[in-house]
Image (cartoon, helix red, strand yellow):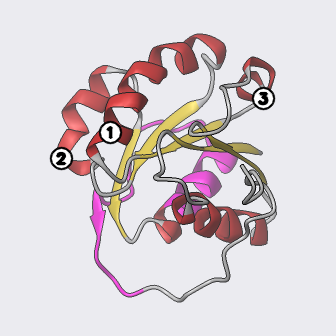
């Protein structure tokens, strides 16, 4: 299964919010590509191959950029399941749902994002079963920064 993780906005740093979930997903055998919109553009070909696209919204600015990008993402990847995750995802759940986002995750999202990918891979179910917010303690996994733009960017 092809997974694309998108970070709409970061303040000049490699996004940990992509690197950590990437490590969880890759360790389970998923093909993961990361896109940092702070330094990269959306890639139509990359999105069209994705089966799961998860957008990290850790702050207000990221949320605003995500809201503007989602219609283009939906157009380029109409069959992909969309997920919004991060601090601002649960508080904007209804907005994201009206834009076609199928799953919204907050709190400690990594195990829930992995569960979502596994569920989508094994079934056609698009209805969210993962909890909206997970506050359970999770193990630390070494982030995978291999798919992120270099620090010089």
Secondary element at tag 2: helix
x and y percent of residue 82 in the render? 50, 34
Q: Is residue 122 magenta?
A: yes
Asked whether disc 3 touches disc 2, contact meaning CB atoms under 8 Å apart, the reply is no
Neighbor class of circle 2 (other Cα within 10 Å; few <14, some 14-19, many 20+) is few
Question: Which region shows up in magenta?
Answer: 113-137
Q: CA distance from mark 2 to mark 1?
A: 14 Å
Image quarter of the N terminus: top right
x and y percent of residue 26 in the render? 76, 64
x and y percent of residue 151 in the render? 72, 60
Vertical placement of 139 versus 76: above or below? below
Secondary element at tag 3: helix
In the picture provided, is 145 more to the left or to the right than 129?
A: right
Vertical placement of 23 versus 87: above or below? below
Q: Earlier in the sequence, mark 2 or mark 1?
A: 1
Question: Residue at the spot x=58%, y=10% of the render?
Answer: 75
Q: CA distance from mark 3 to mark 2?
A: 29 Å
Which label number is shown at residue 61?
A: 1
């Amino acid at each position: 299964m092809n997974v694309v993780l998108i970070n709409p906005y970061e303040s000049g740093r490699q996004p940990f919010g992509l690197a950590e979930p990437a490590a969880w997903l890759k360790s389970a055998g998923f093909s993961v590509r990361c896109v940092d919109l702070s330094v990269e553009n959306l890639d139509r070909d990359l999105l069209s191959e994705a089966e799961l696209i998860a957008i990290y919204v850790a702050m207000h600015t990221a949320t605003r950029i995500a809201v503007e990008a989602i219609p283009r993402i939906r157009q380029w990847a109409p069959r992909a399941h969309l997920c919004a995750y991060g601090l601002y995802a649960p508080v904007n759940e209804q907005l994201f749902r009206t834009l076609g986002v199928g799953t919204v995750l907050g709190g400690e999202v990594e195990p829930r994002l992995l569960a979502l990918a596994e569920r989508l891979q094994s079934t056609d179910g698009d209805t969210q079963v993962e909890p909206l917010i997970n506050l359970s303690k999770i193990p630390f996994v070494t982030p995978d920064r291999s798919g992120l733009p270099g620090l010089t960017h």
